[in-house]
Image (cartoon, rainbow, N blue to C red):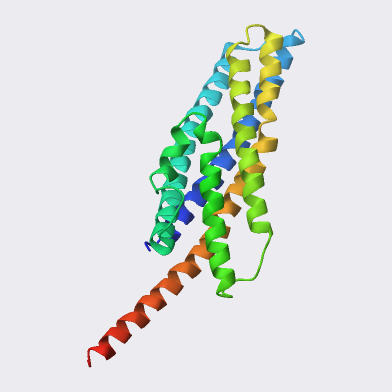
Amino acid sequence: MRPNANRAKLATTFIWIVMGFQIISTISSFFQYLLLKSVAEGNTITPEAANSNDLRQSIIVILFAILYIFSVIFFIQWFRRAYFNQEVKFKTMASSNGWASGAWFVPILNLFKPFQLMQEMYENAENYLLGKKLIDEKKSRKLIIGWWWGLWIATGVISRASNSFENSSNSLDELIDSTVFSMFIILIFVPLSILTVKTIQNYNEMELILEQESDEALHNKSNGDLLDAGI
């Protein structure tokens, strides 16, 4: 098995950062909402105020996109390594570790395959460690990944709807509505971020025990081989 704790830490760190930027984005959208409402009420705003709002929004969108891409990369790297380690540990798996990264990018398949792989990893690790009495039974482990995946799908649908709404907004009222709609994404994005981190951390705890157990077994085998050889 290959070490995976650093990848888990990197993935969770960037997920927290992205969540923070989502909160900043929501605050920025609220300021844009106040600006647009002021215009709708007949107040005059300066070109500088309008340009400042547009620049702020653009910078936040770009930074958010960059950080989000990095968080996805780090998560998939962790996920693939975790699945690879299970291939090493348990030999027979439903898929190859290549699908742990590739399944996210295949249309239709990405709606269920990553969840199936995560569920398989959890069940294998949990059943093995419970059988060895190395962990206590915690039914919430697999419950969390169900909620995690449900929120992941819901966030994807809502984000696409928000982008489509924003791109098709032509009038001032439509732009106000799309701004309000985009602000409500945080209500689902924050729980998703928290559950994603929890999903990684829960599995990482089990994986660390699996690694330790494998290292001890390998060490004992090496000592046994040396004794058999009379060394």
Q: For the view shown, which residue lies furthest in the bottom direction?
A: 230
Residue 142 in view here:
yes
Above or below residue 179? Residue 211 is below
Instruction: Decide if residue 165 is on the left or right side of residue 223.
Output: right
Q: Quadrant of the N terminus?
A: bottom left
Q: Residue at x 73, y 16 (%)?
A: 37
Quarter of the view holding residue 130 = bottom right
Point out residue 95 in the picture as x, y percentages from the top left corner. Answer: 43, 47
Determine the image quadrant of residue 161: top right
| Up/down of 1 relative to 223, above or below | above
Q: Nearer the viewer, residue 170 or 105?
A: 105
- Residue 84's x, y, as percent? 40, 55
Q: Where is residue 19 in the image (x, y as percent from the top left)?
A: 58, 41
Image coordinates for residue 132, horizontal then vertical, percent: 55, 74
Residue 70 shown left or right of residue 55 in the figure: left
Q: Is residue 56 above or below residue 118?
A: above
Identify the residue at horizontal 42%, vertical 43% (top origin): 99
Residue name at image x 38 percent, y 45 percent: 98
Q: Image quadrant for the C terminus? A: bottom left
Q: In this view, does 136 lie to the left or right of 60?
A: right
Q: Is residue 43 visible?
A: no
Residue in front for this viewpoint, 91 or 111:
91
